[in-house]
Amino acid sequence: MSKADVVAGIMLTGATLYAVFGGADFGAGFWSLVAGGGERGKRPRELVGWAIGPVWEANHVWLIFVLVVLWTAFSDAFAAIFSTLFIPLSLAALGIVLRGAGFAFQGTARRLRGRVAAQRLFGISSLLTPFFMGTVVGAIASGRVPVGNAQGDEITSWLNPLSLVVGALFVTTSAYLAAVFLVSEARRAGAADLERYFTSRAIVAALAAGALATAGLIVLHSDARYLYDRLTSEALPLVLVSVVCGAGALVLLYRRSTRGTRPLAVGAVVAVLWGWGVAQFPYLLPETLTISQGAAPSDTLTMVLIVFGIAVVLVLPALALLYTLAQRDMVTEGEGPRASA
Amino acid sequence: MLADVASFAASSQLAPARSQMAFTLGFHIILASLGVAFPAFMLIANYRGLRRNDPDAMLLARRWSKVAAVTFAVGAVTGTVLSFEFGLLWPEFTGTFGGVFGILFGIEGIFFFLEAIFIAIYIFGWDRLAPWAHFWSGVPVVISGFGGAFSVVAVNSWMNQPGGYTLTNGKVTDIDPLKVIFNGAVPYEVPHMILAAYLVSGFLVASVYAVGMLRGRRDRYHRLGLLIPLTVACIATPIQFAVGDTAARSIADDQPIKFAGMECVQETHSDVTEYIYGRCTSDGVKGGIGIPGFDSFLVGWSTSTEVTGLDSVPPDDRPPANTMLHWAFDTMVGICSVLILLAIWFGFVWWRRRDIPKTKWFLRAVAVSGIAGIVALECGWIVTEVGRQPWIVYNVMRTEDAVTGASGVWVTFSLVLALYAVLGTVLVITLRTMAARWREAPAEDQPVPYGPQRPPVEEVGSGGAG
């Protein structure tokens, strides 16, 4: 395994963390959108706001991490992807802006009308980013992104059956992860009604994600043969792990188990992502650019590894601290300022 | 022929791409400055509140943290847009040099992560964390602000003074990380921007309280809200002037054509007149106030210093929009000079009487200083960005060769204009609404920026809502 392969693995790790944590945040936005307006959807939306408030900013940074590793270590692939896929990536960025704005403003809007508008913005934009990120992954996986500055088709590269299925799969998977997390968050908040509410939704989302993943495999068979062949050979164990985890999570959800759903749901998603990574190996852009062809000079890769090492030492403990404090209700909002007490 | 068509297609994206980049960067830079400096004000107030058992300072710190939450959230998304634009607008630049300047963004990523984590702990930690533990959770935010600003501005410095790499057949084959990180422009560009962040944020926050005091809210709370940021800004301003002066002199050495554009020097000669404003033409400066020999003196401490003129390079290699560039430079320097006078006024009266100047004109001056600071900040970015043109990497890669081949940048630019106009408006309205709410109900029992709400405990009789 070369240095470039290790860096590619680090990049996929970042993408995985973004898909799980950032994805769950986007999925939470999805649930706040479909919860319905006014009083009906008020409580689910409250839970969403309460649960992701302290962590969403940090979760979002994984995206920056992936972008930076991609353009530093694999500049050619970055340039090819961002120029050919100009449209879906612009729309994904639009989703990020709207979502951040909607979330920042929904708690502070003075009038109810403004608050509802901010919440709707938050919900709708939560669909945009995962969907268009999915179309980007579909475009890359099916070899529709050639090396160079906007050398691929600006439209059909991402507007094709595989991209659309993967886009839908990303939305569904985000919603699934969010629902599973929100079941636990509802339990932490002591809201049994919301626990039931999100359990049923997690089950529906799990089934939808499973169906879409199967549809994706069928489309891959005709559209991205290289990937399909490897998914059914080298990457098969990971696909099976995903199926087993997904099924296990489903059973636990159905039986309303209080433990194990989160790791299994996360496991299902992680296994699929790494299955994709293994299936695409050794290509960055399947069948046109390999990891070693697209890699930056050795010194750059070393620097990326050093920076990553520092990040592991500094950032991971800090993240663990944040999640622990959040789970123990230490970072949350309550009564008036201490000093006046 | 085909190559001609392709290059035309690419260059037709140049104008919208540059406009979009300038606009989004100009927008983000304000929020980024607040992100760097505002947490420091917050912690100063917090420290004072804890040390002296000062409830006003404590309330300020708490409210500032809520403002910081909103501006940080918006700044994070506008910053994300910029990182997308490295690929969406400038794929040839990032595709060629990503492996060089990218390492600085890797370092920035660490700081951004720490900032996002600890600002969340600080903002949401007011009630449950021990007071001093809570204070210390804010310290990494301030440190990360410095580190993040260093890394990002160092990338811009590298674009001005590229080095530390070997290019073979258009591909980077070797890099020297230390030469990239500590490139030639870092020593003046990085401190210049960090000071700018403290200066702009300081005057901006102080101006809010100056307006409040002008409207009759002259309580201790407002006084403190004015004093903390104003003191920081007034310390930063004279230092900024010295650093800026050094930067200009270094640019005259390192990027003489950029300097010639800033000062409208057409021909290389000595005893160059310094023009304040005026219109730049190929025959020299029309109008404006001229000080004979002073430009040469500023560059080399002697009127006999030779200053390189624009005519030393072909017209294609000169920066565009000379008059704008010159005006931006003069406006930035002018505003900084006036702000120094404000700082001296404040410093003198404080030294004599331990109080702010009694006249309303002082509060009026502070009230406009915030906007003035932002104007100076934007002018500074115009100077460094327009002054570097036509190069994206100085003397190495032209901006027109860096731009995307994708069509549709006009569309995204229009969208971005509309979107950011709304975003900016809503941001200002939100901050004003928060302030109004605080005036009405001093007790800290209101909804809070981005999210922190009480958990929705089960409602009696609500049953299964699913």
Image: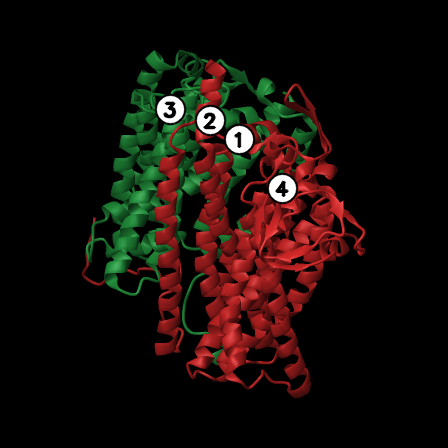
Chain colours: A green, B red
> Helix, strand, or loop for circle 2?
helix
Name the residue nearer the viewer: B84 or B315. B315
Where residue B449 appears, as percent x and y from the top left, is 40, 61
Marked residue nearer the N-terminal end (1 or 4): 4
Few, some or many residues within 10 Å of mark 3 (<14, 14–19, 20+):
many
Residue B400 is marked as 1
Q: Earlier in the sequence, mark 2 or mark 4?
A: 2
Relative to A218, A6 lies left or right? right
What residue would you read off at disc 4?
B155
**Which secondary structure lies at badge 4?**
helix
The residues tagged by marks 1 and 3 sit, at their Cα atoms, a distance apart of 21 Å
Q: Are marks 3 and 4 on the same chain?
A: no
Q: Is residue B90 above or below residue B456?
A: above
A16 vs B310, left or right, is: left
Circle 1: element type: helix
The chain under label 2 reads: B
Whole-angstrom CA distance, mark 2 to mark 3, is: 14 Å
Judged by depth in the image, the label closer to the viewer, 1 or 4, is 1
Q: Amino acid at mark 2?
A: Ala
Mark 1 nearby-residue class (10 Å; few <14, some 14–19, many ≥20): many
Q: Nearer the viewer, mark 2 or mark 4?
A: 2
- Label 3 and label 4: CA atoms lie apart by 30 Å
Mark 3 near mark 4, Cβ–Cβ under 8 Å? no
Residue linked to disc 2: B10
Please, is residue B317 above or below residue B69 in the view? above
| Residue A122 point in image, percent of width and height | 32, 49
Residue receiving disc 3? A154
Name which residue type carries label 4: Val
Mark 1 touches mark 2? (CB < 8 Å): yes
* Label 3 chain ID: A
Q: Please give the chain letter of the residue carrying mark 1.
A: B
